[in-house]
Structures are given as structure tokens and as C-alpha cells.
Amino acid sequence: MIVKMFNLERDHEEIKKDLLRIFEGVMSDGEFILGKEVRALEEAFASYNKVRYAIGVSNGTDAIRIGGLALDLKAGDKFVTTPNTYVASAMALSIHGLIPIFCDIEYETYNMDPERLEEVLKKEEGVKLCIPVHLYGHPCRMDEIMNICNRYGVKIMEDACQAHGALYKDKKVGSFGDVAAFSFYPTKNLGCYGDGGIIVTNSEEAYRKAIMLRNYGQTDKHVHTIEGFNSRLDEIQAAFLRHKLDHLDHWNERRRHNAWFYRKELEDTPLTLPAEAPWARHVYHLYVVRSKERDSLRQHLSDNGISTLIHYPTPIHLQGAYAGLGYKEGSFARAEEAAKEIISLPMYPTLKQDEILHVCRCIGDFYGL
Ligand SMILES: Cc1ncc(COP(=O)(O)O)c(C=O)c1O
């Protein structure tokens, strides 16, 4: 049996007819950039997350950079994030001359450890922004993080690129920070058919600035009030996404069911399984387990037709791009240890029970169970 890591063809099958109809509709409307579809998606996504504003952009990386610039951050300002996230969480702003500072993670959820955050903010002067990443779909400890950031006068941008629909104490992630960034990369819980992203915020000021930044700093046709980019979400992607948004909750439910089934089957293996804090609704963008024998386990699964991935093999502070920051091996022990042991098992809404069983049986064989 072959089990893919993702299976977009299968996930999309149930909505294929709707998408083709939507495609025809946008084609015959003849409006492709910043029109009614983008506006409708922005409204729907803001309302889904219970925030005032949403701004569609070209991808999740741009959502982070425009989100940060909309909060008036500038070159030389420091921001703090975790080192075990996708490199974009740092690179989106470091490319503009902002300086990334890293903070180690908590063992259970792989997310920012509030205690470590406080230590970092005590030590480092001039940190203007904190980027908690709701990694793999599990929310960060927002109360503690917000409390600490308030005390140190640090703004918050949530990186919710992997966590569409996740809840922290019954409230959607993305609705806590000054701004939040989401990605619509195709494999995300809500993904489009190419690149896409969105910023959400309750701040009218950040909203106004982000609207300008995504479209050459424009306030009116041919009036460029500030410098900006071309970072617009396409009409066609917005139309697809608005349709898919209606399915997000039940797709997340299926992911949660798959996670439940994995847990039931893997409970007696030596693997460390993903945690779900009592205050959290995890949306399992990824199902990440941990093993001391990660590389040989991965090979064994591959030999049995099962694809897996590692999110992420090299923490950001050890990437060549950030060699100049002066971090070294050992700077963030928990993130580094996790990078050596984590493995992402197949996870998507249409993953079947017999496929999960196959994965779990192969893991059982590997451990001689
Ligand atoms: C945590 C995180 N941040 C940022 C990004 C960047 O999003 P995109 O690939 O849409 O630019 C991603 C997705 O790849 C991500 O997983």
C-alpha cells in the first residue's frame, strides 16, 4: 500500500465540480485583481476569525512582512520568534533589515515557551515585536505571551500559517495579536491553487497601512503615499478560498479524528505523540511524532510505501543565512533536540483508516511489537 504524505488530488475530489463552476464564473466576470472576490473572502475570513479586518496578499511570507511593516517596524528593530518554525517566520522581516532573536520552545507542544520569552526580553534591549508561531496547528500559550509582551511594550504578530481554525480557550488563533498572518499554500488546512496569504487585525491603522503596502503604497489610483509592493491575492484564488472556507471546520474535524485514531493505535509504542493542551483545539496541520530512532524509522516507513517529512530538520538559528547572528549549536537545546527526533506522518482530511492502520502497523513492526 502507498500512503502519501499529502493527497491534494483526493482532498479536492469532493469539491472539484464546485471549483470548476467558480472558475467559469470568475472567467466570465473578467475581473482578476483586487475585485469583489477578494473583498468577499476578506469579509468572510475576518468574520470566521471574529476580527475586524482581513487583507488578502500573495503568500504567507508576505502576510508576515506586510503585517510587520504595517505595525511600523523598521530596519534595525529586533523581533523574537522560535527557531524551529519554517524559515519564513524570520526571513520575511530579516530581509528588510529587522533582526531576529530566538527563544526556545516548550517540550510538549514545540511552541514558544513563555518563560524563555520573558528571559529573552529581560536580556535583549530594543525588541519591538514577538512572533508566536502556532506550529503544526497547536495554539501557543497566548495569555502568558500577551501578558509578558504587554509588560515589555512588545507588539505581537501571530504566525497562524499552520493553524487555520485552531482555538485557544475557545477563541480563534489570529484574533489575539496586533496582527496575524495566514498562508494559503496548497497543503495548508485552508489552501489555494498556487500561492496566497492573508493578514488579519483589529487595528484600523494596521489595516490601512497593509492595504497600501500590498499595492505599491497606493491610496488612490496613481497616488502612492508610501513605498509598497505588488502583493495581491488573485480573484480566482479568493473565489476558490471562499468556497473552501465553508468546508474548513469539517475538514479540521476529520484531521482531528485521524489524530485520535493514530493516538489509539500508537499509544503503546515508544513514540512521543503530539500533545493537545486542555485549553487548545489542535487542528493537526501536521501529525508530528518523536523518535530517538527517527532516521531508521523513516527509512523503514519509506521501504513500506509510506511518505513522511521533517518539519524542520535544521533550526533557523543554524541556517547559513543567519550565521552572522552569532548563535551556535547548543543555543536552543530543546529546538535542536526536537529537530533530530521529529517526523511528520501522513495527515490530511481524506486519509483513510486502513492507511493509518498500515502506517501504525509498520511502526509496530519497526519496534518489534
Ligand atoms: C509557520 C509558517 N510561516 C510562514 C509560512 C510561509 O507561508 P508561504 O509559503 O505561503 O509564504 C509557512 C508556510 O510555508 C509556515 O508554515
Image: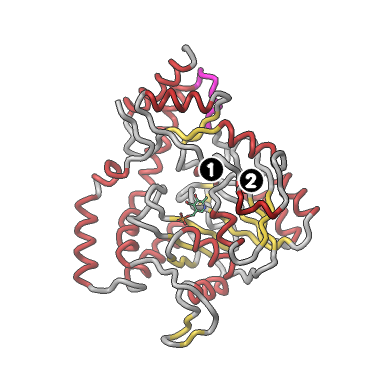
Distance between mark 2 and mark 1 Cα atoms: 24 Å
Q: Residues within 10 Å of mark 1 (few under 14, many from 20)?
A: many
Q: Amino acid at mark 2?
A: Leu
The residue shown at (32%, 67%) is 235
Lower sequence index among marks 2 and 1: 1
Ligand 1 has an atom within 8 Å of the beta carbon of the residue at disc 2: no
Q: Which image quadrant is residue 243 in?
A: bottom left
- On the image, the x and y values in percent for residue 237 come to 33, 61
- On the image, the x and y values in percent for residue 171 come to 53, 51
Residue 297 versus residue 251 in the image, above or below: above
Residue 318, label in figure: 2
The residue shown at (62%, 50%) is 142
Along the horizontal axis of the image, is 199 left or right of 140?
Answer: left
Query: For the view shown, which residue lies furthest in the bottom direction?
Result: 222
Q: Main secondary structure of the magenta part?
A: loop
Span of residues in magenta: 267-274
Q: Amino acid at mark 1?
A: His
The quadrant in which the N terminus is found is top left
- On the image, the x and y values in percent for residue 134 come to 55, 47
The residue shown at (75%, 63%) is 126
Residue 90, label in figure: none
Which is nearer the eye, 139 or 327?
Answer: 327
